[in-house]
Amino acid sequence: MRASEGRETRPHAAQFWTGIQVALPIAVGYIPIAIAFGVMARQVELSLWDTALMSILVYAGASQFMAVNMLATGAGGLEIILATLVINLRHVVLGLSLMNLLKGVRPAWKGALSLGVTDESFAVATLSGRNHPVFLAGIMLSAYLAWVGGTLLGGMLYQFIPPDIGNSMSIALYAMFISLLIPEMRRERKVVMIAGTAMLINALGTELLGLASGWSIILATLAASALFAGKGEKA
């Protein structure tokens, strides 16, 4: 019985360890950004517990940065929730694509793995060409722990970071968005048009209409997406 159990668990352990190794670049990249988030969250007077809980439960880097910035500007809860929902709608597509990759896998595994989907983990998982659920669990758990750990580190050390450096860490938000946007802009012209239109609508909303930043972001995102929905790139 023990020998049989050993043969049963060894492949799974190997798959899990391989997943962790594959996800190492993601984890290394997440840690400094998560530290920046932890510092920013504590600087807007979120408690260490609330800061950590946001990373544990929300686990959506760009949305977390945006939520902290919106809190700092006095945005309401409804604005933050709607803006987060709009930004994270892409995860519906990522999740459906991942479920297609996991055909034949038990629903319990699918449900658990869907909680760990991020842009980076999804890209690594799909490009690897491997659909073993334990391998994917290694990728997603490694990235998740790096994000939560980095958040805790930033939240605990924020008092030792000079205010100027802490404030400059907000650039991590823009760097994250740009890193996601530029590759898509290079591949498809329509993305350039959507991004430019959203920027223009957001500027008009805040400067001319006097909308709060949160509502302006929501309006700009929805309007730009609606304007270009279904329009393919023209040669």
Image (cartoon, rainbow, N blue to C red):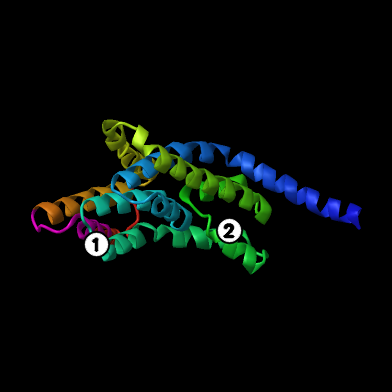
In the displayed orientation, state which residue is furthest to the left: 208
Whether residue 230 appears in this view of the structure is: no
Q: Answer yes or no: is residue 2 visible.
A: yes
Q: Which residue is mark 2?
A: 113
Image depth: mark 2 or mark 1 in front = 1
* Horizontal and vertical percent position of residue 199: 21, 49
Which of marks 1 and 2 precedes in the sequence? 1
Q: Position of residue 69 (x, y in %)?
A: 27, 49
Numbered range of the magenta stretch:
208-221
Residue topped by disc 1: 76
**Residue positioned 34% across, 45% down in the render:** 42
Q: Which quadrant, please, contains the N terminus?
A: bottom right
Q: Is residue 210 magenta?
A: yes
> Residue 140, percent across and down?
57, 50
Residue 111 percent across, percent down from the top left? 58, 65
Secondary structure beneath dot 1 equals loop
**Mark 2 and 1 residues: CB-CB less than 8 Å, in contact?**
no
Q: Quadrant of residue 187?
A: top left
When asked about the image quadrant of residue 43, the answer is: top left
